[in-house]
């Protein structure tokens, strides 16, 4: 019994199938000339069963058949049948075991008169079918009605010709292909190259929302500026392929683009996608780019006039000219986490120029980068916040700004606009990091400015108090906060940063608000020649300074004027444990006290070009002996004294 079972297993079970199918093309015949679309037929047999036959034209698979009539398999050849071309047809057959057999190749010729030819004007609705293909556009074609293309339709366009839609009349192109039956727009030329034809151009009269490109391929155009140029019509584009352009892939302006998603772009000599600022929100997800001159969405400058969101679509935005956010509607441009905005030479982003506008950038969940297309310092002009910037809605948080400074501009310039900057990184700038003109900050904290060719920050004395904590300003050509001088009219606190303050002109403190200037422990203020810190010169004010250094930009007597406490300086003013060095340039000491009673104790006052302290006694006065006892005065000018009392 066991022997019989073994014999059944050995003799009765079939062995491993290693025999490939046999397959050959039966139609068309080798050497045939074809005048229209055709069906390719093949006969395939196998010792067991053929599961499918794949059909190829010039090595590119055009279809598959797995439901034969007997052993005859078929595939409609509806694709690229270029008139005058010679093509090689092959097919392969596969059996259930995965064995493959290949047919002998046959060669066919495409008649120069093949297909349906078009030119001139389409003034009434038309439908182009795949069966009537290829559809040859022999010269410029003006679509002034609705042109519908069925799945599988192939359109071949002559050199330098354009398919123009809606030039004068309401018109549309409806091209809804399928994943297994795409619609193709290509060049008629037998050896096509990028730019062979101009492109598909949707012009001003295109019917809004009526045109569709779905499961389409557009190739070898671009000499008109793009493979597809949408000036109007809110064209909907999805699941399509754009390749081999001498310029852009898809270009859109005005209300030209309705949506663009799930499409691929390759071989474009310029940016694969170029859209005006108002159309960025039409860019959807799923688009991919490879092998283009620059894999990015181009924004060719212009103005954001309506509130919009720029999403992170996986590729950078390339800003190639000045971009402005401003309009009477006070638009807000929101840049989402993870985005990169890369700027061409001399391009910039301006907010609130002439009209209200706001910018909100929050990189908390993915840092936002503003940078250069070339990655070279000084190749773009930076961000500018103008006087009509909406300061309440303008926020930059967790952003990087790098490689700005073209024309000696700052990475960020604020013109009378208070903005919030937090957790920022500004690096590799060819000029100043941040320049504030007649303004300070709504908030400024935890920011890093490094590797700038100028100062990390330039700001007027009145607004230094808006610089918050947690900042780093090292690694620049000049590691100091440049202070332009001016009048402080409200309470201000000069906080300890990791660099000194460099004061260019005199700082006056005083107003009807009785402002207090508080200088934190450890702060160093360096003064240029001729500069002073004057408290209460024309109006009431006070100074609170403990363990602070006030000195000149040069270590020589008289390098700056000195600290002046005038008659309106409040008696609550305190100068304790400070160092006042290298002053006296105004010939009235490093410390000048005029008819007020500040607390002056524990200070070092030294290296003066005249006396150390000059007291003007009118109604009240400080005791010179007490000043000597409780302060260290040394190295005053030869022939002078440590303290001079005047009246």
Image: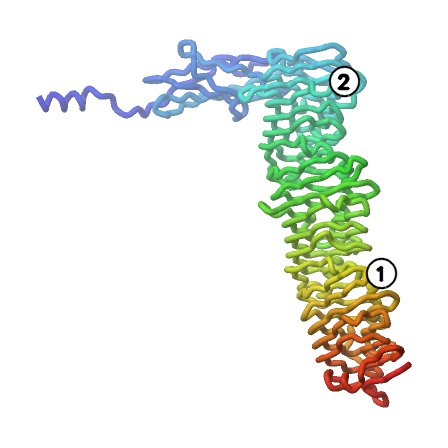
Task: Name the quadrant containing residue 640.
Answer: bottom right
Q: Position of residue 90 (x, y in %)?
A: 49, 21
Relative to the observer, which residue lies in front, 531 or 477? Answer: 531
| Number of numbered discs | 2
| Relative vertical location of residue 484 with respect to residue 111 in this rendering, above or below | below
Which one is closest to the eye, mark 1 or mark 2?
1
Q: Position of residue 577 (x, y in %)?
A: 70, 77
For label 1, the residue is 512
Task: Name the quadrant containing residue 230.
Answer: top right
| Relative vertical location of residue 399 with respect to residue 587 in this rendering, above or below | above
- Mark 1: few, some, or many residues within 10 Å (few <14, many ≥20)? few
- Decide if residue 619 is in sight here: yes
Quote the CA–CA distance across marks 1 and 2.
Answer: 74 Å
| Residue 142: numbered disc | 2
| Relative vertical location of residue 354 with respect to residue 35 in this rendering, above or below | below
Q: Position of residue 338 (x, y in %)?
A: 61, 44
Q: Earlier in the sequence, mark 1 or mark 2?
A: 2
């Amino acid at each position: 019994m066991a022997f019989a079972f073994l014999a059944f297993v050995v003799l009765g079970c079939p062995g491993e199938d290693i025999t490939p199918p046999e397959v050959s093309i039966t139609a068309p015949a080798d050497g045939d000339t074809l005048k229209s679309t055709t069906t390719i037929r093949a006969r395939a047999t196998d010792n067991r069963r053929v599961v499918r036959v794949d059909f190829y034209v010039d090595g590119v698979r055009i279809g598959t058949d797995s439901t034969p009539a007997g052993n005859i398999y078929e595939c409609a050849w509806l694709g690229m049948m270029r008139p005058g071309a010679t093509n090689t047809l092959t097919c392969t057959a596969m059996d259930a075991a995965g064995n493959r057999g290949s047919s002998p190749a046959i060669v066919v010729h495409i008649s120069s008169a093949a297909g349906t030819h078009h030119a001139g004007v389409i003034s009434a609705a038309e439908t182009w079918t795949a069966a009537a293909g290829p559809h040859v556009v022999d010269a410029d074609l003006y679509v002034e009605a609705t042109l519908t293309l069925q799945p599988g339709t192939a359109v071949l366009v002559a050199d330098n010709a354009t398919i123009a839609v809606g030039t004068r009349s309401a018109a549309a192109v409806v091209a809804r292909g399928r994943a297994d039956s795409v619609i193709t727009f290509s060049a008629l030329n037998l050896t096509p190259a990028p730019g062979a034809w101009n492109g598909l151009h949707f012009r001003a009269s295109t019917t809004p929302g009526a045109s569709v490109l779905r499961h389409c391929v557009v190739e070898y155009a671009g000499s008109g500026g793009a493979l597809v140029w949408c000036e109007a019509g809110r064209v909907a584009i999805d699941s399509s392929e754009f390749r081999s352009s001498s310029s852009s892939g898809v270009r859109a302006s005005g209300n030209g683009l309705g949506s663009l998603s799930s499409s691929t772009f390759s071989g474009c000599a310029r940016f694969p996608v170029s859209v005006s600022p108002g159309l960025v929100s039409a860019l959807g997800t799923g688009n991919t780019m490879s092998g283009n001159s620059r894999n990015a969405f181009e924004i060719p400058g212009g103005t954001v006039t309506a509130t919009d969101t720029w999403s992170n679509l996986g590729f950078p935005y390339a800003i190639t000219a000045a971009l402005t956010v401003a309009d009477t509607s006070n638009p807000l441009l929101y840049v989402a986490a993870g985005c990169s905005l890369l700027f061409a030479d001399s391009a910039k982003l301006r907010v609130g120029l002439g009209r209200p506008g706001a910018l909100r950038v929050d990189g908390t969940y993915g840092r936002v980068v503003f940078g250069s297309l070339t990655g070279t310092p000084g190749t773009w002009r930076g961000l500018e916040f103008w006087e009509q910037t909406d300061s309440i809605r303008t926020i930059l948080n967790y952003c990087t700004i790098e490689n700005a400074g073209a024309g000696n501009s700052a990475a960020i310039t604020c013109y009378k606009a208070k903005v919030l900057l937090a957790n920022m990184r500004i690096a590799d700038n060819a000029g100043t990091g941040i320049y504030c003109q007649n303004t300070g900050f709504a908030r400024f904290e935890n920011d890093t400015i490094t590797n700038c060719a100028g100062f990390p920050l330039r700001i007027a004395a009145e607004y230094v108090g808006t610089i918050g904590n947690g900042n780093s300003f090292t690694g620049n050509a000049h590691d100091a906060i440049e202070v332009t001088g001016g009048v402080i009219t409200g309470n201000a606190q000069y906080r300890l940063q990791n660099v000194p303050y460099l004061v260019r002109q005199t700082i006056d403190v005083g107003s009807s608000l009785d402002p207090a200037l508080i200088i934190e422990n450890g702060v160093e203020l360096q003064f240029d020649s001729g500069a002073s810190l004057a408290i209460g010169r024309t109006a009431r004010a006070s100074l609170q300074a403990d363990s602070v250094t006030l000195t000149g930009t040069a270590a020589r007597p008289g390098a700056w004027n000195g600290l002046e406490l005038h008659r309106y300086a409040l008696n609550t003013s305190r100068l304790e444990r400070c160092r006042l060095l290298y002053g006296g340039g105004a010939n009235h000491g490093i410390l000048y006290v005029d008819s007020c009673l500040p607390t002056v104790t524990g200070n070092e006052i030294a290296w003066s070009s005249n006396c150390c302290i000059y007291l003007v006694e009118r109604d009240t006065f400080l005791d010179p002996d007490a000043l000597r006892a409780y302060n260290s005065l040394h190295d005053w000018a030869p022939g002078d004294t440590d303290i001079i009392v005047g009246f």
